[in-house]
Image: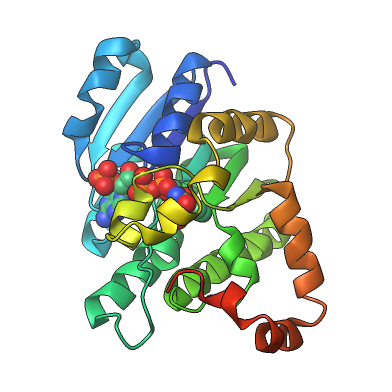
Amino acid sequence: MIGKHYVLTGGTSGLGQSILQSLLHKSVYVTVLARNPEKLNYIKAQYDTNHLTIIKCDLQSQAQILDLDMHFKHTKIDGFIYSSGLGYFKSIENHTVTEMQETYNLNVVHFNILLKVLQPYLSKNPSIVGIGSQSAFLTQGYAAHYGGSKAALNQVLNALRIEKPNYHVMTVNTGPIATPFHDKADPTLKFAQKYKKMMLNPDVLADQIINSIINKKIELNEPKWMHIMLKFYQLLPRFIEKNFVSLFKNKA
Ligand SMILES: NC(=O)c1ccc[n+]([C@@H]2O[C@H](COP(=O)([O-])OP(=O)(O)OC[C@H]3O[C@@H](n4cnc5c(N)ncnc54)[C@H](OP(=O)(O)O)[C@@H]3O)[C@@H](O)[C@H]2O)c1
């Protein structure tokens, strides 16, 4: 990946931050789209700043995403990694209208708008990587919109792979990761405490993602045991939901 140019979102925190460090370690030129660029000051001090470009952009704003076009004129993009995302662990009834819109906009709608803006500048065989979630594959009581938005992201990426055979399109579906995501999703941190022991390490996951890009994998599912269990669940989903109801309320 040395010398390639990647565009990254979510690079200021959690998994995206770990991906950013992995990319810079590999001497990749990275353009980070961030609503809080000052969060990257410590990275600028640590790495070769020639390799890092930061563009301020609030990914909840369609207008700001469309304005990005001018920044990419005369550039070539070899890869695009979309790691920004959010979710609210609460009932459907308790989501505010703003929370619903924020979830779908950031997790799926604005991914599509940003892809459309970047497409004219993509190289011949670019890598497009979406950070999805294992929650795309199961019914999510108390995180319905999060699961719904990640299921939609999965479908879009799978269709993109078919429509654009020259693209390498990879979906990363992960279980819980130890990141600040949980502070916003559930400020009581009940879910995070309960699943602390099984949370994935973002640095390890970031290295797996980079290796998977190099090896042109189309899916990365972690942890593997969770993905296998969800395959069995998909054989009889309504039966399992009815008879093991507590499994589907773990975000309550
Ligand atoms: N953590 C988990 O348990 C888990 C599990 C499965 C999947 N995922 C997925 O993994 C991805 C990475 O999440 P994470 O765990 O690393 O979460 P995180 O630590 O909360 O990071 C989220 C990133 O998205 C950025 N972001 C949020 N809203 C934005 C906006 N309006 N404009 C620009 N950037 C914005 C944040 O920027 P700021 O720094 O400015 O806030 C931050 O860099 C997400 O897609 C998430 O859905 C996470």
* Residue 245 or residue 208, whichever sits in front: 245
Out of 154 and 126, give the one closest to the viewer: 154
Please provide percent x and percent y for residue 249: 51, 76
Please tell me in which quadrant of the rendered image residue 207 appears.
Answer: top right
Is 94 left, or right, of 232 in this rendering? left
Q: Residue at x 30, y 68 (%)?
A: 102
x and y, in percent, of residue 142 in the image: 43, 77
Q: Quadrant of the N terminus?
A: top right
Residue 27 vs 20, above or below: the answer is above
Q: Residue at x 31, y 41 (%)?
A: 33
Residue 37 found in image quarter: top left
Q: Is residue 179 left or right of residue 126?
A: left
Compared to residue 219, the image places residue 19 above or below, namely above
Image position, residue 63 (x, y; %): 22, 61
- The answer to whether residue 61 is above or below residue 36 is below
Residue at x 65%, y 69% (from the top left corner)? 137
Give percent across and percent down for residue 72. Answer: 35, 38
Q: Splitting the image into 4 quarters, where does residue 52 fall?
A: top left
Q: 51 left or right of 3?
A: left
- Residue sitting at x 70%, y 86%: 243
